[in-house]
Image (spheres, rainbow, N blue to C red):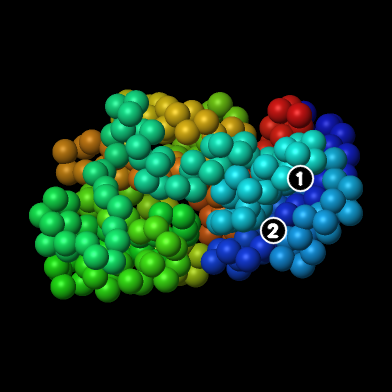
Amino acid sequence: MTQDKDFGHVVVVYGGHSAEREVSLKSGGAILAALQRGGVDAVGYDLAKGGLAGLEALSPDIVFIALHGRGGEDGSLQGALELAGLPYTGSGVLASALGMDKLRTKAVWQSMGLPTPESISLSADMDWSAVVERLGLPLVVKPVHEGSTIGITIVRDHGELEKAYQDAAGFDTRVMAERFVVGDEFTVSVLGDRALPAIRVEVPNGFYDYEAKYLSNDTLYHLPCGLSREDEEVLASLCLQAFEAVGCEGWGRVDVMRDADNRFWLLEVNTVPGMTDHSLVPQSAAYAGIDFDDLVLRILATAQERG
């Protein structure tokens, strides 16, 4: 039982400097409270306050990474912890860096024959007409290295494309456009080698943006997701394949669209998903009979097992 494990001194790392700082603070606070309720010797640490030196001064036995976005989810923190010989939750250096790069993640999936919408890299001097001709309308423009739908625009008219690029470029030096899949949005959480029950996300305005994810009370999360048992098994298998293809470990989440022809399309993988009161991994785990505190302990156990 995870409750009986001795995890030693655990430091929950959150905050940081990324565009997802506020969400990270909420995730980290919830994780820390769960660990302390479970009797774990745990403290929280905002990486923005004292950097790696401050983290090392806390002498952690295990680091629970709740740092979303760049600086915490992109392999850089993972690399530092590897050099320090410290176990940590979640994916390793390569998978973290790859998962943070949406274009390269999709390239890996395509190389393995896994379905993902066509996409291209954008630049300021693009032929915008050629982009529309290739991907069609509507299409999605997004930063390559951001999460939480930050900087994303659904482009429905040719004239909106350049501004959408400029908006995304305000968050990242690399921007991409992706074919828009009309249909239902699903998310599948992964814990260890297990796919948790899929969630179908329904948003009144049709776009699961930052507000819908973290602020709105109007977003609907359907559990059960409404798929047949056979289709949910197909979706779970696809998401586990996608997770493993990137080299992910421990826990994470895969986001998927299903089109009008009932085909699933992989969008992205999240290697440090949110753990707020609006977040999807805790909801899926709860439906599977795993309460929040137990979920946090199970994630922590995967770090100890990996060592």
Residue 196 showing in the rendered view: yes
85 or 187, nearer to the observer = 85
Taking 71 as reference, is 83 above or below it?
above
Q: Determine crowd level at label 2: few under 14, some 14-19, many 20+ residues with C-alpha closer than 10 A.
A: many
Give, as a three-letter code, the residue at label 1.
Answer: Val
Give, as a three-letter code, the residue at label 2.
Answer: Tyr
Determine whether the residue tagged by mark 1 lies in a helix, strand or loop. Answer: strand
- The residue drawn where x is 85% and y is 46% is 60
Residue 172 coordinates in the image, percent (x, y): 44, 63
Lower sequence index among marks 1 and 2: 2
Name the residue tied to disc 2.
14
Determine whether the residue tagged by mark 2 lies in a helix, strand or loop. Answer: strand
Name the residue tied to disc 1.
63
Residue 236 showing in the rendered view: no
Instruction: Estimate the spatial distance between the alpha carbons at disc 1 and disc 2, rounded to whole Å.
Output: 10 Å
| Disc ID at residue 123 | none
Taking 125 as reference, is 231 above or below it?
above
- The residue drawn where x is 17% and y is 44% is 260
123 or 214, nearer to the observer = 123
Number of numbered tags placed on the structure image: 2
Residue 283 coordinates in the image, percent (x, y): 53, 48
Residue 75 coordinates in the image, percent (x, y): 60, 45
In this picture, residue 231 sits left or right of residue 105: left
Quadrant of the drawing holding the C terminus: top right
Q: Quadrant of residue 94?
A: top right
Quadrant of the drawing holding the N terminus: top right
- The residue drawn where x is 56% and y is 48% is 74
Q: Determine crowd level at label 1: few under 14, some 14-19, many 20+ residues with C-alpha closer than 10 A.
A: many
Residue 10 coordinates in the image, percent (x, y): 82, 46
85 or 152, nearer to the observer = 85
* Name of the residue lying farthest toward the front: 125
- The residue drawn where x is 50% and y is 65% is 214
